[in-house]
Amino acid sequence: MKKNIIVTGGAQGIGKTMVVNLLKNGYAVTVFEIDEEAIDELKEEVSEETVSMFCVDVSDENSVKDAISSSAEIHGNIYGLINNAAVAANKPLTDLSLEEWNRVMGTNLTGAFLCSKHVVPFMKDGRIINMASTRALQSEADTEAYSASKGGIMALTHALAASLGPQIKVNSISPGWIDVSAVRKKATARQCILSKEDHSQHPAGRVGKASDIANMVLFLLQPENDFITGQNFVIDGGMTTKMIYV
């Protein structure tokens, strides 16, 4: 029986790359995605019998509970949960409505809480990986809702690690600039043209790719890495270090 990994927000961007990478590496995958058009396109691209897809609003508890139960029934287990679903409402603070704030918090932070809460009864020895962001560590203007939600993800991560250990290991990943402009549904996919300056400002010499994050996910899922929990892994090509210390 293949280990089943749930990926929220799994039909576009970093999440989609994770799904493809996990399938290539022998995992079963369950995709939670709110965008039905993106789900339909992913179904055309991915034909493995070991993948299942559900239209899920991660901020809705009943939707989450039903999809998790179905995932466990289909695949016979849940080994991993990747809380990747996220939205943003980046605008001047005085223009940011309470409704927009709550929508970002509901998807990015409450969604991770709900998925973690309801997946735990199905996990005997598993992994939860939360997608945070370098915005939790350094901010850009007009990102209050998104930055606050990702800071909450980091705190939720070490709290879950303390509560769920030793059986379940919980870590977070904080991506920096990851170019996913072409890894979207057809209606919005537009490859961004990156300049030499875009790449050279990173100590690593390039802008990040979705595969950089997907590979870190694979590392954290491996059973032999079970001494790692409660940690946040920054994957930004060295940008955070450069901007803070130089």
Image (cartoon, grey):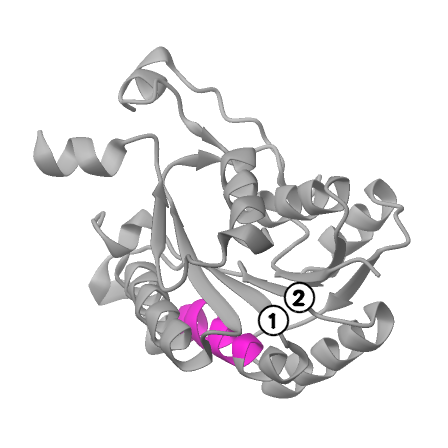
Q: Which amino acid does label 2 sit on?
A: Tyr
At x 63%, y 36%, the residue is 189
Q: Distance between the residues labelled 1 and 2?
A: 7 Å
Report crowding for label 1: few under 14, some 14 to 19, many 20 or more residues within 10 A (C-alpha): some
At x 56%, y 42%, the residue is 214
Query: Does the CB distance between marks 1 and 2 fall below 8 Å?
Result: yes
Q: Nearer the viewer, mark 1 or mark 2?
A: 1
3 sits left or right of 181 in the view: right
Q: Mark 2 points at which residue?
A: 79
Q: Name the residue under label 1.
A: 125
111 sits left or right of 161 in the view: right
- Determine if residue 100 is in view: no
Q: Nearer the viewer, residue 213 or 171?
A: 171
- Highlighted magenta segment, given as a residue range: 102-116
What predominant SS class does the magenta segment belong to? helix
Dot 1 or dot 2, earlier in sequence: 2
